[in-house]
Image: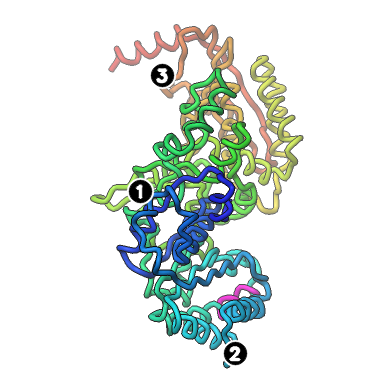
Amino acid sequence: MTDFAKIRQQGQLYIDKTEYLNSLQKQGKYFIFLRPNRFAKSLFISTLQHWLERKKALFEGLWIEDKTDWTQSHAVLVLDFKSLELDNLENSLTAWIKKQAENAQINLVSEDFLEQTGELIQKIAQNKPLALLIDNYDLPITHFLQNSAILDQNKQILASFYAQIYSVYDHLSFFWLTGVAHLGQFSFWQDLSFCEDITFDPSFTTLAGFTTDEMNFYAKDELRNLATEHPEHDIWALIESFYKGFSWNGRDMMYNPFTMMNLLEYQQFRNYWYDPQVAWALASLLPKQNYPVYQLENIVLDLPKIDQAKLLPLDTIEFLFRSGYLTIREKNIVNQIVILDYPNKKIQEGFYKDLLLAYTQTNEDDLTEYLFKCSHNLLSSKISDFIDTLNLFFQKLNHQDFPKKEAYFYSIFYLIIKALEKDWQANILSTRRRIDAACQTEHALYLMQFKIASTESILEKLKEKNYLSQMKEHTEAVYFLAISFDAEHIKIADFRLEQTSLADLVQEDELKGASL
């Protein structure tokens, strides 16, 4: 999926992005473009390479075909840091440079690999316009955030490497650098000052990812097959609810290419793009940065922070945004703010599930069993058994890493409710110094509050809230469920269940209104 030539030669589905080649050519020569993993950045580099080399046959029928002078070819160097030994970076870069020199039939005089970098670029550029394309530029840093020795070593090597590129960049006819993380706080970023960062450029917000129009135009046959495979569903409504929502301007909502290509190939609605390692990394990061899980929705940030965010110390929001787990839901230029949220429910569900696995140090089979028991017990009105099952989660917490703070105990309860919201038609009603939730079963509605307090005070507070909007007319019974948590012993200490009815609540609400 990253080799443009193979895709075209084998007649595979290709979403035509070649119009952006023309846009880049008009806008400048040196660019930085950042996107999360699996957003077809490597495929675009492959496309760039073959276009610059003027492989016309590969572009037949594409947008760019009749808008290119195919006689003006470039020499192209492609450096993919993913292909290097990152813990042996200097030797690995030296080997890459020597290989490029051999391919270009150039004799390098310099013995130092850094000087060889500049010499290689200058000598190739003497004979032909030269383009340098760098993929996964950030991996030598991001792979070693927990290994300070290798991290420091790689920072020095990259500083010298990019200093060499900066010294000869005017010999390059084109330069393209891509990756995931913004490394502006590292010294070598200054040596990339000759580049234009088009990550948030309005002209390129849809370069990586697929739009609905692109899918309908280029993949109509595959989508028709998918609809035939799932005749019981409105196929586009299903696709949008599962996968749509990535955006870098708060307006154009994109689909992840890796997800969509796998969906069309396997015809199954799965979480293809999701990477559980992100959740495991955040399981230790969130408590350290005082970020309860339930605060990671609809985050309002100053617009400049998106561009100026630092990788180290590792910032929760920056990490989630650059990784693709948060996206720009709204962008307000006048007020200079952005609102970040999960791209879609599939990513949110997978992220919550893996956070629950990481926090509780349990395996997926046990988690499935516990969640099933929670669901079954509440649906069967076995409240005592429901509480016992909830306590199983708290018994498995990693007590060393998990702080004894209300917010983090609330996070566990929040994640459980979220994991079962389909079974229960559950809604989180409040996350302000407690967790309030409404859970609808076939025969009853449970209004819950989870808090470090006595059941009496919890019940009193719960009754004070006007949650009539959560009531369903067909509900036969309404229950208040007060859940008292013991932070010292990390368990649910007590609970109290009190039945009421929709009619009683409506009458009580009317009386309150009349008294005002």
SS state under label 3: helix
What is the distance, in whole Å, between disc 1 and disc 3 at their CAs? 34 Å
User: Depth check: 130 or 248 in front?
Assistant: 130
- Judge left or right: residue 454 versus residue 167: right
Q: Could you tell me which residue is drawn at 45 percent across and 82 percent down?
A: 127
Report how many numbered discs are placed on residues in the image.
Answer: 3
Q: Could you tell me which residue is drawn at 56 percent across and 44 percent down?
A: 12
- Mark 2 or 3 closer to N-term? 2
In x, y percent, where is residue 217? 42, 36
- The secondary structure that dominates the magenta segment is helix
- Judge left or right: residue 259 versus residue 392: left
Q: Name the amino acid, label 3.
A: Ser
Residue labelled with disc 2: 112
- Mark 2 or 1 closer to N-term? 2
In x, y percent, where is residue 39? 51, 51
Q: State which region is magenta.
A: 150-157
User: Depth check: 349 or 393 in front?
Assistant: 349
Residue labelled with disc 3: 469
Q: Could you tell me which residue is drawn at 45 percent across and 75 percent down?
A: 130
Task: State which quadrant residue 263 falls in.
Answer: top right
Mark in the foreground, 2 or 3: 2
**Which label was assigned to residue 249?**
1
SS state under label 1: loop
Q: Name the amino acid, label 2.
A: Asp
User: Depth check: 297 or 121 in front?
Assistant: 121
Q: Name the amino acid, label 1.
A: Asn
In x, y percent, where is residue 259? 56, 42
Mark in the foreground, 1 or 3: 1
What is the distance, in whole Å, between disc 2 and disc 1 at their CAs? 44 Å
